[in-house]
Amino acid sequence: MNELDIQLAFSKGDESALECIIELYKRPLFRYCVTLMCNREDAEDALQETFIKAYEKRKRFDPEKPLLPWLYRLAYTTCVDAIRKRNRYIDLQQLLQKKGGSRRKAASNSQDILSPQLYRVLSGLTVKERVLLYGRVFDDQSYKDLSLILNVSESALRKRYERLVLKLAQQLDCEKKTEKRLLHEYESDSRTVGRY
């Protein structure tokens, strides 16, 4: 069965086509969810929820259009919803801690998939910026596909991407300056300690 046959069978409710789709797209969608969620466990949950939603909404899918952008769109909305719920949970936990209630730690960010530098960069971006960065850099998606995912015009995405590149360059420059300053302070402290 080729991709078009799988898409057609999927839209008609064929469960074996769903299994094929999961096998074909689980890796890129998982990477996408990790990029948006910055957390492996949450990304796994979002991925599972995405495939559930895909099956539930299969009749809305147009088999004449590419499937992957449609799946990315479902993953995007699933991740955004999960992030909103997570933020409400964290806010509630912080409120309870201030009131002297629960002392449990708020949800932590798992960094076991992302390097500390990538985690720091991604966590400083909005969800839409993460989607755009992931799509253009990590997944080599066209602006046309990204416009389907984000429901934004291609020209607007091009402009957003330009701004994002500038923002990341400034962020990197700021980190380098901070690193140099800290190194200089460390070296100054080391020389001072060595004199005594």
Image (cartoon, rainbow, N blue to C red):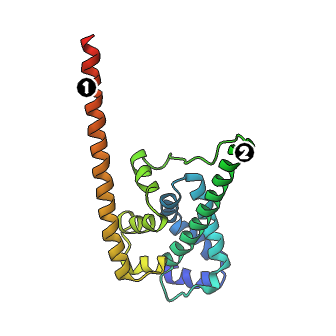
User: In percent of the image, x 29 and y 56: which residue is there?
Assistant: 170
Q: Amino acid at mark 2?
A: Lys
Left or right of 151, for residue 117: left
- Specify the farthest residue to the front: 99
Q: Nearer the viewer, residue 27 or 53?
A: 53
Of callouts 1 and 2, the N-terminal one: 2
Q: Position of residue 188 (x, y in %)?
A: 25, 25
Q: Which mark is residue 99?
A: 2
User: In percent of the image, x 34 and y 70: which residue is there?
Assistant: 161
User: In percent of the image, x 65 and y 48: which residue is there?
Assistant: 94
Q: Residues within 10 Å of mark 1 (few under 14, many from 20)?
A: few
Q: Nearer the viewer, residue 80 or 46?
A: 80
- Specify the farthest residue to the right: 101
Q: Is residue 2 above or below residue 171?
A: below
Q: Which mark is residue 55?
A: none
User: In percent of the image, x 61 and y 67: which residue is there?
Assistant: 81
Q: Nearer the viewer, residue 59 or 122?
A: 122
Left or right of 30, for residue 129: left
SS for callout 1: helix
Q: Position of residue 131 (x, y in %)?
A: 45, 67
Q: Is residue 26 above or below residue 148?
A: above
Residue 144 visible in image:
yes
Q: How many marks?
A: 2
The C terminus sits in image quarter: top left
Query: Mark 1 or mark 2, which is nearer to you?
Result: 2
Q: Amino acid at mark 1?
A: Ser
Q: Which mark is residue 188?
A: 1
Left or right of 153, for residue 13: right
Q: Quadrant of residue 195?
A: top left
